[in-house]
Image (tube, coloured by chain):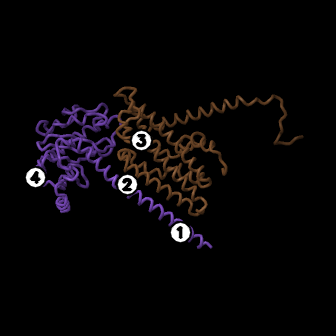
Amino acid sequence: MIFQSMGKNSLLLALFALITALILASTDLITEDRIAESERLAAQKALFEIVPLARHNNDLLVDLQPIPEQYWLALGLDNGGDVHIARLDDQPVAAIVPSITTDGYSGDIAMIVGINFDGTVAGVRVVDHKETPGLGDKVELRKSDWILSFNGKSLNNTEISKWNVKKDRGDFDQFTGATITPKAVIHQIAKTLEYFEKDRERLLSAINFSDNPSLGEQAYNE
Amino acid sequence: MSNVSISEVTKNGLWTNNPALVQLLGLCPLLAVTGTVVNALGLGLATMMVLIGSNVIVSLIRRHVGDAVRLPVFVIIIATFVTCAELLMKAYTYELYQILGIFIPLIVTNCAILGRAEAFASKQPVGMAALDGIMMGSGFLFVLLMLGGLRELLGQGTLFADMHLLFGPMANSWTIAPFGENYSFLIAVLPPGAFLVMGFLMAIKNAIDWQIKLRADAIKPDPVKGAKRIRTTGNIS
């Protein structure tokens, strides 16, 4: 008797699991392409803001250069990352470098730093952070245009000691009520520029993988 | 509760037994994501969809599933709907999905949904169960919207900001900023603000209920002084 009811119940559960698995699988199939497209667009959006389409005509999402392991620590990348190379008619224009600082007020601040090949900042965007709303979140372009104050700056026209908030005799504004967040971002951008100086030649001479994705994959896997 | 009327179900979901204001269920996502109207609307609609779907299916299978496996089956059904909602949001409202983040999958753990499946849908015909889902979902959505609207208005001084995340480019100009551009009142955006606004909403609801009760009492005739009463306890000597 008890075995009979156990059998019946387990069959029923299995049936439900099967049906729901089928429903989930089909939903996944239907939405799969759309999700991939959305993810691609979201990733592209930030890149396009830094290097607009007028300045490049290659596929930024495919033209990648892995960052050598010795730089991971300075860029705060625990698991490595890729530099996006922007090219106009095959001439390298700018590199977009992912960079993470752990010195924020709460948690990591992840950003992407676009650097022109002449060493000036093309643009910076904070892509993920947990800073205090209303104070530290002015690093977002949505809340304040502070992040645009880096455009055109380089290690040549702004010496390294000036990469700080004005309160500490630097060149950049702090926010009212928040200095830790802007300081962390400023320092990290300077570090990213330093990385770029060191890795510039390699990135400049890198092969354009976007024309030949299989070649890129090959180099990537090596 | 085998026989309930449509009006009763409606009133229960929207007011008397409102999942957020009275049952206080699903508070974690409720308080966490209601910083703006658009977040509230996104989470509210997703929750409502799941609630309606799970109520209907649970009601359909109520005669075929025994007590022993009832709860696991309900949880499977709810989890399926939540995952579908998550996939759909990821596909069509990707940025909103990123903002709401973990709170979309967490709808599974919203006790309001399992609660309605267990307490109502598993004992009622499909139509009533669907209506209950709509009404309970609307009740929850309504409170989310109130919270989101008030906190957005108090905290950032805007209303309907970023609605394009849900409605596309045509909603770009919907933002209203009644207090000017630079207004901000931090605490309303932070978690304490969520609790404060929620507390005020509950107080307002209770005050309205109290007024209704007072009015109802006023209509009732006062008992006449010296009228005969029946003693129900003690010894009559």
The residue carrying mark 4 is A205
Q: Are marks 1 and 2 on the same chain?
A: yes
A149 lies left or right of B161: left
Task: State the CA–CA distance, disc 1 to disc 3.
Answer: 41 Å
* Residues beneath discs 1 and 3 located on the same chain: no
Q: Indicate which disc residue A31 carries.
A: 2
Distance in Å between CA atoms under marks 3 and 4: 45 Å
Q: Relative to residue B113, is residue A159 drawn left or right?
A: left
- Answer yes or no: are tags 2 and 3 on the same subunit: no
Residue that label 1 marks: A11
Q: Earlier in the sequence, mark 1 or mark 4?
A: 1
Residue A163's x, y, as percent?
18, 37
Asked if B140 appears above or below B158 in the picture, the reply is below
Which chain can be seen in purple? A
Amino acid identity at mark 4? Ser
Q: Which residue is mark 3?
A: B39
